[in-house]
Image: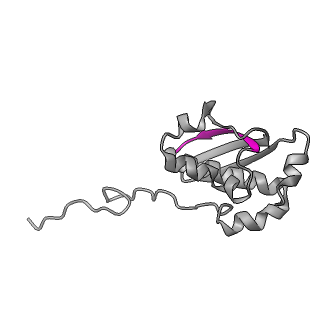
Amino acid sequence: MAAKNLLKAPSHKEFATGRRKEATARIQLYKGTGTIEVNRRGLAEYFGRPTLQMIVKQPLEAVNLVGKVDVIANVRGGGLAGQAGAVRHAISRALCTFDATLKPLLRRGDYLTRDSRMKERKKYGRKGARRRFQFSKR
């Protein structure tokens, strides 16, 4: 659809940052053959589970750009699920900054919303964030 503008641009790179939980992803998105590289490894090698690979590809599938753009991602912090969500967020943002007409499609799929759920901090006088120490009357 509106992604044609991205494909006509001569080797234009788009940079973006995405976050989820404790993970932060910085990506470069440019016209190519569809390779996705995460921390200098292939997508399937880095994210072994097919579910995580699917999460990363979701924004590209939403705008019909699978196999038409390359992505180089650097991810730090968090676990694999958080990192996959961060890469998805970054790809969505990169697509939006390049072509504003893609924004409604990505917004509809909820790919542009930053998932703000974080781990709750441990409180004093408790074993964890909410867990109390064991109570005994005697």
**Residue sitting at 35 percent across and 63 percent down?**
130
Give the overall secondary structure of the magenta segment: strand
Residue 10, image quadrant: top right
Asked whether 118 or 3 is in front, the reply is 3
Left or right: where 68 falls relative to 127: right
Of all residues shown, which one is farthest toward the top?
A: 40
Is 83 placed left or right of 35 in the picture? left
Quadrant housing the C terminus: bottom left
Q: Residue 74 appears in which quarter of the rendering?
A: top right
Please give left or right for residue 13 compared with residue 71 in the image. Answer: right
Please give the name of the residue rendered at 85% of the width and 50% of the height, measured from the top-left corner: 6
Q: Is residue 11 left or right of residue 93?
A: right
Q: Quadrant of the N terminus?
A: bottom right
> Percent x, y for residue 16?
74, 48
Q: Residue at the location (85% across, 47% down)?
A: 7
Looking at the image, residue 74 lies above or below residue 54 = above
The relative height of residue 93 versus residue 113 in the rendered view (above or below) is above
Q: At x 68% / y 69%, what residue is drawn?
A: 108
Magenta-colored span: 68-79
Position of residue 49 measured from the top left corner of the image (x, y, whole percent): 48, 44
Residue 89 percent location from the top left of the image: 66, 54
Is residue 128 found inside the magenta-colored segment of the image? no
Residue situated in front as seen by the camera: 134 or 50: 50
Q: Looking at the image, which is closer to me, 35 or 115?
A: 35
